[in-house]
Image: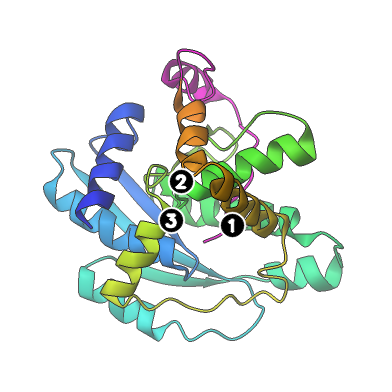
């Protein structure tokens, strides 16, 4: 957990993610990353000099039944207000629209529902549990399927919903998330979507693993290229601040 907190501090200090008076809504999927983010943000709140509040919200997509009682107990134990919000996103995507490629629409609806829930609860920021591999996977998918070099930003102001999305764990390797989640015995829920594990993101994940068999530190070098603001500017913090008034297109990662 010490390394994870150090990575969160690094992201916070570089991109000024968290400011005094913020009320942050953590988007909880039930996966390891979002549950780990709950614990990490609560600890960071305790040790940070910045004064901010944290709550957590989980969207019930209306797909398969999920027992969220263990997550409620976990949230209560670490002292974070937690709420499950029912939605019909699953029905919209798989029944009403019958999408052949449902991931993009599902992600868009989930983002909108989470941002609205955050605003309704007085939050000005939404924290998502995307880790380093989510950054790399989105980068590869953007190049291979869209023909452009792009990935989601560490911090994004969404003017339509008037919330700022932050991703405090962008520097945390997924292997650390897996290790710490296992050590802490976090109440991780199984995926509740039938196509989980058969997406373009999974293909990108496998591609990164393959590249690392050829170049052992390929993931580290890719991340360095993304964060190298002097040469490439993809994550140039000045550009990020200047774009606060724009709605930025982004692709969600799954945890």
Quadrant in the picture for residue 232? top right
Q: Is residue 19 above or below residue 34?
A: above
Horizontal side, residue 54 vs residue 240: left or right? left
In the image, 47 versus 5, the foreground residue is 5
Circle number at residue 132 = 2
Q: Residue at x 39, y 85 (%)?
A: 69
Q: Residue at x 62, y 38 (%)?
A: 139
| Label 1, label 2: how far apart the Cα atoms are | 25 Å
Crowd tier of the residue under label 2, counting other residues whose Cα lies within 10 Å: few below 14, some 14–19, many 20 or above: some
- What residue does disc 3 label? 174
| Label 2, label 3: how far apart the Cα atoms are | 7 Å
**First in sequence: mark 1 or mark 2?**
1
Horizontal side, residue 10 vs residue 228: left or right? left
- What residue does disc 1 label? 113
Residue 125 image offset from top left, x and y in percent = 41, 44
Horizontal side, residue 190 vs residue 83: left or right? right
Q: Report the colour scheme.
A: rainbow
Q: Residue at x 30, y 65 (%)?
A: 180
Q: Is residue 176 above or below residue 193?
A: above
In the image, 162 versus 237, the foreground residue is 237
Crowd tier of the residue under label 1, counting other residues whose Cα lies within 10 Å: few below 14, some 14–19, many 20 or above: some
Q: What is the secondary structure assignment of the residue under circle 2?
A: helix
| Label 3, label 1: how far apart the Cα atoms are | 26 Å
Q: Is residue 242 magenta?
A: yes
Point out the stretch of residues depicted in magenta. 229-255
């Amino acid at each position: 957990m010490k390394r994870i907190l150090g990575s969160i501090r690094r992201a916070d200090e570089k991109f000024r993610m968290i400011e005094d008076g913020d009320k942050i809504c953590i988007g909880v999927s039930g996966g390891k990353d979002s549950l780990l983010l709950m614990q990490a943000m609560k600890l960071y709140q305790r040790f940070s000099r910045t004064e901010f509040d944290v709550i957590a919200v989980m969207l019930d997509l209306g797909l398969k039944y999920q027992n969220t009682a263990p997550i409620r107990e976990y949230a209560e134990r670490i002292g974070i207000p937690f709420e499950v919000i029912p939605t019909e996103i699953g029905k919209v995507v798989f029944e009403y629209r019958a999408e052949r490629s449902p991931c993009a629409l599902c992600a868009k609806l989930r983002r909108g529902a989470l941002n609205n829930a955050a605003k309704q609860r007085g939050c000005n920021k939404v924290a998502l549990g995307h880790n380093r591999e989510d950054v790399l996977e989105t980068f590869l998918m953007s190049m291979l399927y869209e023909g452009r070099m792009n990935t989601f930003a560490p911090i994004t102001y969404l003017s339509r919903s008037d919330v700022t999305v932050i991703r405090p764990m962008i520097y945390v390797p997924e292997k650390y998330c897996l290790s710490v989640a296992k050590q802490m015995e976090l109440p991780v829920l199984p995926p509740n979507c039938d196509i989980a594990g058969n997406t373009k993101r999974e293909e990108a994940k496998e591609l990164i693993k393959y590249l690392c068999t050829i170049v052992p530190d390929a993931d580290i070098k890719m991340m360095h290229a993304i964060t190298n603001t002097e040469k490439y500017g993809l994550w140039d913090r000045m550009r990020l601040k200047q774009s606060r008034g724009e709605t930025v297109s982004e692709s969600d990662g799954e945890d």
